[in-house]
Structures are given as structure tokens and as C-alpha cells.
Amino acid sequence: MQQINFILSLADANLILSQRNAEWCGHGPVLEQDIAITNITLDLLGQARNFYQYAASLVNQSGNMPGNIATEDSLAYRRTEREFKNILLCELPKGDWAQTVLRQFFYSVFCKGLYTQLLQGQDAQLSAIAEKSLKEVLYHVRWSGEWVMRLGDGTAESNQRMKQALQFLWPYTGEMFMPAGFENNEIDLASIKKQWLSQVRSILEEATLQLPAGNIFMQSGGKKGIHTEHMGFLLAEMQYLQRMYPDANW
Amino acid sequence: MMQKQTLDIKQEEKKVWDLLAHITDPEVPVLTILDLGIVRAVNIAPHTLEIVITPTYSGCPAMDMIATNIRMELLAAGYQNIQITHVLSPAWTTDWMSESGKEKLKSYGIAPPNARQQVCNNDLFAPHEAVQCPLCNSYHTHRVSEFGSTACKALYQCDACKEPFDYFKCH
């Protein structure tokens, strides 16, 4: 059960962030970047599907849901807010472009560390998903990192917006490294955090931004199903069709 | 007797591979799924036929359609109990694309992927790959965007003939 919850937390984080980023579709600042963010969104959705398909197969093997066959769709569309285990960072509003690219950067650098560890783990399927995802995540790190530098070290306004985004998002970064009890014991969150801090610090410095200092309170709860006020609205939109017309198909 | 059976399976396998060579990528229709290197194995058992495929990108929307097209092609050829298995590891790379596939891409107007060991640099603000214009063959091109009309492509423009073009990016 712990392993299923762990996989679900990864699936949920990717799905919820892809749903958020998809709000940019048709609204990006310029066409090429609109296409870039939606391509990244598609990668996240594909990675979420791989995790959900694997979680569904484990749920069905476990026999915990008799008569009720779990599928990738039932896990994405039929679970309630309290059952979602994504970190809060992923569900926050998309905000302006600065907030979107900085959130993507924080999340992608975290995924890079996490998938690198999963890749070496015992679970062959999880390792295969991580191997596939990692190739895509490296593009995301580069794209979002370049944007953080471009805006941070850009005009007075872009710098100001990046500072605001940093101040808003920072308290949600701590949850990535807080264990929730379901992580498999091959995962070393402390070492992921160390690598994450080192890469984030160096990019922020290049971007003429300061890593927030001092003892900042870190928000948490997402991994345990306690979400922000934004989550219900997101799910209402994302799950509407399957709730209204169960099993509707193309 | 044993030898004959082995031979039959070999012939049968070749027949299946030949059928698979008819199936094209729905988004880049000049390429067959064999050109792309998506089909990893054909496994023939007494009552089942298993086709093992691997996705190009995790979110590639063409994969479901490709799986359906494989099934249709084989059903039409009289096969039954067709199983299509998706594998993720080893992860797909553009190095698996056939040379003839690269030729076809180029004549279609899409620059084929550069060899992976030469490029695929993930450093921030790394110099862009030198990509040859598929129309005038000039190397004086620049990247407009790393992301293009599909997950597998980037957007370039030629500085010599000024034409914009797609580059099937190395992955």
C-alpha cells in the first residue's frame, strides 16, 4: 500500500502541474513560448499516465478494490481532493509568466534528483518510468532555468516580478523534501535537497536574485491530502466531464 | 522437424515485420514505425502474437493511434490474439532512427536528428546545435524555439535561404 501511495503522489504531482500549465494554452506571451509550455505540459501528462497505469496495476493486484477495477482514468478522475497526494507547489495558480517558469524550475530540478535515484532502485517498472521521464525533465530544467535567468537579470520590471514569484513560491518548496511516510526507503530526500539547493542557488545568483534567507515557515499537507483552497476548483474543472458523464468516451 | 519449425517461425516473423513496415507515424507520415525504431520485438507463440513497442516521448499522443493501427493491420492479415506490449526501458532515442528514415525526413522538409553523442547538451544557454537546412543544405541556421509543433521537433530558421523549418531534435 505504501508503494502505491508513493507512486500516486508522483502521478498526482505531474497531473496537477500539467493541468495548471495547460491554462497557458493559447495565452502564452509569444507563440513559441506558448508551444514550449504546452509541450512541457504534455510531457508531464505522459509521465503522469505512466505512473497511474503502474499504480492501477498494483491496486488491481492487491485486491483492495474488489469488483472495482482501477484504471489510469479512474485514478485521475474519480478520486476526491483528500485522496490526491501531490505537493502543494503543483496546485498553486499559474500566476504570471515569472511565477510559472520559476515553479517549473523548482519542480523540474527536484524531479531530476528524484528520478535519478528511482532509476537505480529495485522496482524495475518505476526505474523504467524514471529513465524515460528523466530525458524529458532535462529539457524542462534547461528551458525553465534559462527563463529564470532571463527575467531575473532582465529589465527592472521582469526582475521585480521574479522577486515577487520567489517570495510567493519559496514557502512551498520545503514540502518536496519532507517525508510523508510512504516514500520507499531507497529514496534519500536529504541528498536530493542538497543537490536541489546547490543548483537553485547557482541559477538564482546568475539571475541576480537572492535565495530567501532566515527561518521561513514551510507549507505542507499536500502529500497527506490536505490541500490549498485552489485545489477544489482545479479538480472541479478537470474532473467535470467524468463526474457528469461517467465513462464517457471519445 | 525442429529445424522446420524454427524456419517457419523465422518466415512468419519476417511476414509480420513486413506488415509493420506499412504503418506510418500519424504525425510524420513519411516515416514508418520501423524507421522510427518504435517496434522493439515481434514474439510469435503458438496462439498469440506479441508486438513490443516503446514510446518516443511519454506524452506522445500518436502512440495510442499507432497501437490501434498495428492491431488493424495484423487483424486484416488474419492474425488473432494480438497483444501489444508497451515497454519504457531502454528509453527510445533518435539514434534508433534508420538511415533511410533520416533521408525520407530530409526530403520531406524536416531536418533529421543529429547523432546523439555529438550534441544533446543540457547546459543552460549551451550553444545551439549546428543543424543543416533541409532545403538549401546551409549550416547557417538558428534555433527559433526548442519546442515545436510536436514533442519530437524544434523550430529552426535558415539564415541563408530564410526558410523556417522543423528539426527532429536529438533525444
Image (tube, coloured by chain):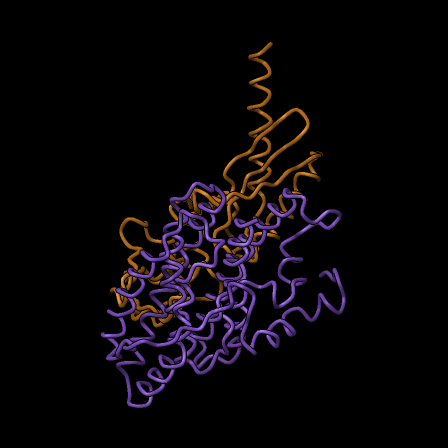
Chain colours: A purple, B orange
Q: Position of residue A244 (x, y in %)?
A: 75, 69
In this orientation, which residue lies closer to the viewer: A117 or A175?
A175
Q: Which residue is most to the top?
A: B1
Q: Which residue is most to the bottom?
A: A156
Q: Is residue A187 shown above or below A203?
A: above
- Name the residue rendered at 66%, 68% in the picture: A239
In this orientation, which residue lies closer to the viewer: A198 or A140?
A198
Q: Position of residue A209 (x, y in %)?
A: 26, 79
In this orientation, which residue lies closer to the viewer: A207 or B145?
A207
- Name the residue rendered at 76%, 66% in the picture: A245
- Name the residue rendered at 30%, 71% in the picture: B159
Q: Quadrant of residue A30?
A: bottom left
Q: Quadrant of residue A23?
A: bottom right
Q: Left or right? Give the position of B61 relative to B72.
A: left
Number of numbered labels in the structure image: 0
Q: Is residue B9 shown above or below A245?
A: above
Q: Position of residue A163 (x, y in %)?
A: 33, 83
